[in-house]
């Protein structure tokens, strides 16, 4: 174990370049940026928590949703990939029962008194609630979590649909798991992240985001039994065909304040399920839904019915996407990506927020993507939970500059991000 100063010297000297390349790719420009980023994180840890301390370094990736938009919380299928945008953390155990976390870009230092395990009203929807919820989750499994100090820096676009919250949760979970020798599997840590987000943060998320960040690679999950989801990891090497680039556009509209809109999707889907004596749509036969549509409309309203149709279609589509990737049929996969994007508009209705019709950044991004890419062999869809945030596009290399220039003319320089899939999940790297 090394001090923060020793690790910084090693990184500056290139000792850990192989590790950084495995996380971020071979580009020398990217490597230089990551060296500087990791060294800055070590320096800032010292600024807040003091020099000379022995530290560990952690990373947790963001994720791109490839299929399964709002299906996981209904016990359906999910398909997501860990990406090269990540959160990094510098951590050291302390001698008291407090967790202190300072995150770059946020003024507040989160201080968690571990003697208080219950959710705190003042922390709801803030990062402190996620830390407390994760710690309580470990404790509920009989794992001893003590105090630590940590400094984090995140490249995962906040409020964008790339799961900055899941990356934060998985980083905190990795620190707790490693520093206190808890021995939980990545999937178990992911479950605790969902627990923290649902119960402590107050957002009724599914589990797919946490699984993708925790495990890395491309994750296909069957949530029919949410207590024991069936998870398959698809290795990323060669998954994207040569000449195809994954882009996400930051439309500069955050969905971080749209928890109520997300919750309405789940609530309306489950109101339809209740008409059949079920808790979630994954338990409802699609044929039964169509047979009783008039009664369900009367009981739940039309938007809830359309969102149920979205679930049935998107769930089948996600399974088909998985089979297409397994078969190496990327053309079929892209066709399904386009269908998913269309369904978000017409059925799930989560591309823009109804009460604010003048603000439709995602709608503009998708319309612009269609204008720039139609007929090129590319595909585009909404990214993540919706209502604001990022759009996603698979862009042929020959059209990349045309697409990026067109996007950034509308949404500003640096709004189009080129992503790569990442094999490594959340964990300690040094």
Image (tube, grey):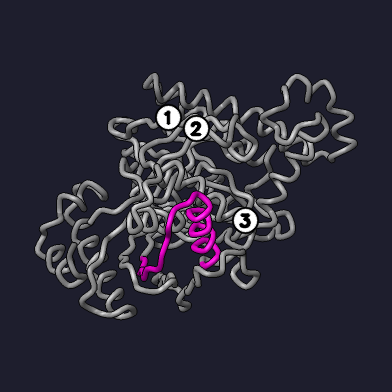
Q: Position of residue 181 (x, y in %)?
A: 34, 53
Judge by depth and name the residue closer to the eye, 254 or 235.
235
> Is disc 2 placed on a helix, strand or loop?
strand
Against 61, residue 75 (above or below) is: above
Mark 1–mark 3 Cα distance, whole angstroms, equals 27 Å
Q: Is residue 272 left or right of residue 429?
A: right
Task: State yes or no: residue 219 in magenta.
Answer: no
Q: Is residue 176 left or right of residue 41?
A: right
Q: Is residue 11 left or right of residue 170?
A: left
Q: Quadrant of residue 394?
A: top left
State if disc 3 and disc 2 touch (CB < 8 Å).
no
Instruction: Report which residue position mark 1 lands on.
Output: 232
Identify which residue is drawn at 62% across, 73% down.
122
Against 117, residue 420 (above or below) is: above
Judge by depth and name the residue closer to the eye, 180 or 333.
180
Q: Quadrant of residue 207?
A: top right
Identify which residue is drawn at 44% across, 53% down.
143
Mark 2–mark 1 Cα distance, whole angstroms, equals 6 Å
Q: Position of residue 166 (x, y in %)?
A: 48, 53
* Camera-side mark, 1 or 3: 3
> Is disc 3 placed on a helix, strand or loop?
helix
Judge by depth and name the residue closer to the eye, 20 or 371.
20
Judge by depth and name the residue closer to the eye, 110 or 377.
110
Instruction: Report which residue position mark 2 lands on.
Output: 221
Instruction: Report which residue position mark 3 lands on.
Output: 199
Q: Position of residue 38 (x, y in %)?
A: 25, 64
* Camera-side mark, 2 or 3: 3
> Is disc 1 placed on a helix, strand or loop?
strand
Range of magenta residues = 128-152
Task: State yes or no: residue 139 in magenta.
Answer: yes
């Amino acid at each position: 174990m090394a001090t923060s100063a020793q690790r910084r010297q090693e990184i500056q000297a290139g000792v850990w370049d192989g590790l950084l390349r495995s996380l971020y790719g071979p580009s020398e420009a990217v490597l230089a940026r990551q060296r500087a980023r990791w060294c800055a994180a070590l320096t800032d840890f010292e600024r807040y928590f003091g020099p000379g301390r022995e530290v560990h370094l952690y990373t947790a990736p963001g994720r791109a949703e490839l299929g399964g938009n709002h299906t996981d919380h209904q016990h359906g299928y999910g398909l997501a990939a860990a990406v090269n945008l990540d959160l990094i953390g510098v951590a050291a155990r302390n001698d008291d029962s407090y967790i202190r976390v300072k995150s770059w870009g946020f003024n507040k230092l989160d201080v968690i008194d571990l003697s208080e395990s219950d959710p705190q009203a003042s922390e709801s929807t803030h990062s402190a609630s996620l830390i407390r919820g994760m710690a309580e989750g470990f404790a509920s499994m009989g794992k001893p979590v003590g105090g630590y100090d940590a400094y984090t820096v995140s490249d995962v676009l906040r409020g964008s649909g790339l799961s900055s919250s899941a990356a934060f949760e998985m980083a905190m979970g990795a620190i707790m798991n490693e520093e206190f020798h808890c021995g939980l599997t990545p999937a178990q840590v992911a479950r605790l992240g969902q627990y923290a987000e649902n119960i402590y943060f107050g957002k009724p998320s599914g589990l797919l985001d946490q699984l993708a960040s925790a495990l890395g690679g491309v994750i296909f999950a069957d949530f029919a039994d949410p207590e024991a989801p069936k998870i398959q990891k698809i290795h990323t090497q060669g998954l994207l065909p040569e000449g195809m680039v994954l882009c996400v556009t930051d439309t500069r509209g955050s969905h971080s304040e749209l928890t109520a809109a997300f919750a309405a999707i789940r609530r309306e889907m489950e109101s339809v399920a209740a008409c059949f004596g079920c808790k979630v749509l994954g338990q409802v036969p699609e044929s039964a839904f169509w047979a009783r549509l008039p009664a369900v409309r009367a009981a739940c309203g039309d938007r809830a019915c359309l969102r149920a149709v979205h679930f049935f279609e998107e769930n089948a589509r996600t399974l088909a996407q998985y089979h297409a990737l397994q078969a190496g049929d990327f053309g079929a996969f892209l066709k399904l990506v386009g269908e998913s994007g269309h369904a978000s508009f017409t059925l799930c209705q989560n591309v823009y927020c109804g009460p604010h019709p003048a603000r439709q950044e995602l709608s503009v991004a998708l319309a612009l993507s269609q204008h720039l890419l139609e007929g090129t062999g590319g595909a585009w869809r909404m990214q993540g939970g919706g209502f604001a945030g990022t759009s996603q596009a698979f862009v042929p290399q020959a059209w990349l500059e045309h697409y990026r220039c067109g996007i950034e003319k509308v949404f500003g320089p640096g709004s189009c991000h080129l992503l790569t899939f990442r094999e490594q999940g959340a964990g300690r790297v040094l």
